Each structure stands twice: as structure tokens, then as C-alpha cells.
Image (cartoon, coloured by chain):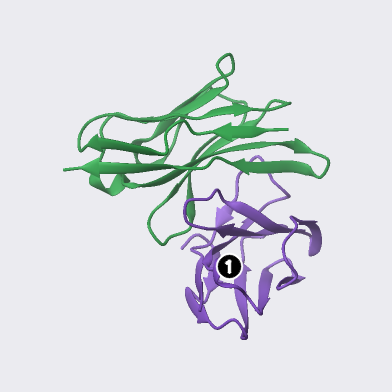
Amino acid sequence: AQSVTQLDSHVSVSEGTPVLLRCNYSSSYSPSLFWYVQHPNKGLQLLLKYTSAATLVKGINGFEAEFKKSETSFHLTKPSAHMSDAAEYFCVVSDRDNYGQNFVFGPGTRLSVLP
Amino acid sequence: ETGVTQTPRHLVMGMTNKKSLKCEQHLGHNAMYWYKQSAKKPLELMFVYNFKEQTENNSVPSRFSPECPNSSHLFLHLHTLQPEDSALYLCASSQGRGTVYGYTFGSGTRLTVV
């Protein structure tokens, strides 16, 4: 069965400094991986996805993530944080089960951006 | 707007009330989902519908009753809820169940049970 671990429940950075949100997964097959962002009182928005093409994936708002199979990781990065990046971030693995594809959400990492 | 619309955005209901949450998508997606998001807890999958047929019910109490009249609409009927049911209820859709292309989420309904 697949699972997702987000190593930090809360990350705090200063505006203009790099962001690193960590995600590790376990999966029986070759998974698809996603990062979603949720701003307060909003739904989840897709940031980027990995679906077995290039291992370095670029998403919206300057975010990118690198799929590292040997480390079973899919960490999210951004070179320079902006105040509007403050939100909850979810790492998601999509894997196969008897019904087809199954989504498993990580517990989330709350990103705070300090002025 | 994401293409998935949820109404109402906020709902306050008493424990003896009956209410319904509505989700609508016109993205041509075949699968629709209800998730529950409670404070400090992971996202919980409640129900999955694929081509209008319910394919998953993750041990959800019977006071939550889903309905999917067609591939574009999904309802969650609520009755005799408990205060611990207060949460953000999110609807999502996808092209095929759990597609590699990801889910599209609505903005959610913030439910408060008093």
C-alpha cells in the first residue's frame, strides 16, 4: 500500500529566501506524484505533477519539485519565497489498487512567510 | 474558479436539521469525490463516484448520504449530525478515477454543527 510522509508539519521562512518542503513516499508501482496548495478557507489547487516524464517538474508560481526514485522523495522548492506563498501544502501519491488509481494525501505542511 | 463549484460556501446547522451540500462540475470529468478536512487531521476520503456509480464508501456514518444523479453533479445529504462533523467538506473531480492527471477541487463548504 502506498503512503506519503511530509517531514515537517510547519516551515517558516523569510520573504525572499528559499523554500524547501519535504515529501517522501512509498509505493508498490511507479507512482504519479503531485503537490497541492491550499490557501485559508479555499480548496486545493494543483501546483505541479510528476507522471513518469522529466524528473524535474516545474509548476505554477515559481515552484518546482524533483522526483528521486532512489530516495523515494519528491521535495518541493522555490528559490525565493513571497508573502502570498503562505499556505498549506499537500504532497500526494497516486498509485494503483484494485479499483484503478488511488490518491493518498500527506498530512500537509504549513508554510509561513515572514516579512 | 477551478471548474468545480460547491454550494453553499458556509453552513451552520443544528443537530436535528437536514441539509444538503451540492457540487457541480462541467469539466467533462467522470469521477467525483467527497473529502472531509478537519483541523489538524489528514484529508479523509469519504465517497467516490465513477460514472455515477458509487465505488467507495470509506466507513462513513449513515448520517452522511451521497447522491450522484449524473456525472456533473454530486450531493451530500446531511441529517442528525454531531458537533464533531464540523469541518471543511471538499468536492473533487477527475477524468477517470484517480487519474494520473490529478484532481480538480472545489473551494469547499465550511460546515458548523451546533
Q: Determine if residue B106 is in view.
A: yes
Q: What element carries label 1?
A: helix
Q: Where is residue B37 in the image (x, y as percent from the top left)?
A: 54, 57
Looking at the rendered structure, the number of numbered marks drawn on it comes to: 1
* Image hue for chain A: green
Of residue A24 and residue B69, the one placed in the foreground of this image is A24
Q: How crowded is mark 1: few (under 14 residues within 10 Å), some or many (20 or more)?
A: some
* Image hue for chain B: purple
Point out the residue furthest to the left here.
A115
Q: Determine if residue B29 is in view.
A: no
Residue at the image position 28 percent from the left and 37 percent from the top: A12
Instruction: Name which quarter of the figure residue A16 lies in.
Output: top left
Of residue A99 and residue B83, the one placed in the foreground of this image is B83
Q: Where is residue A45 in the image (x, y as percent from the top left)?
A: 47, 51
Q: In this view, does B65 lie above or below B41?
A: below
Instruction: Name which quarter of the figure residue A71 lies in.
Output: top right
Find disc 1 in the rendering and name its residue.
B85
Q: Position of residue B112 (x, y in %)?
A: 49, 73
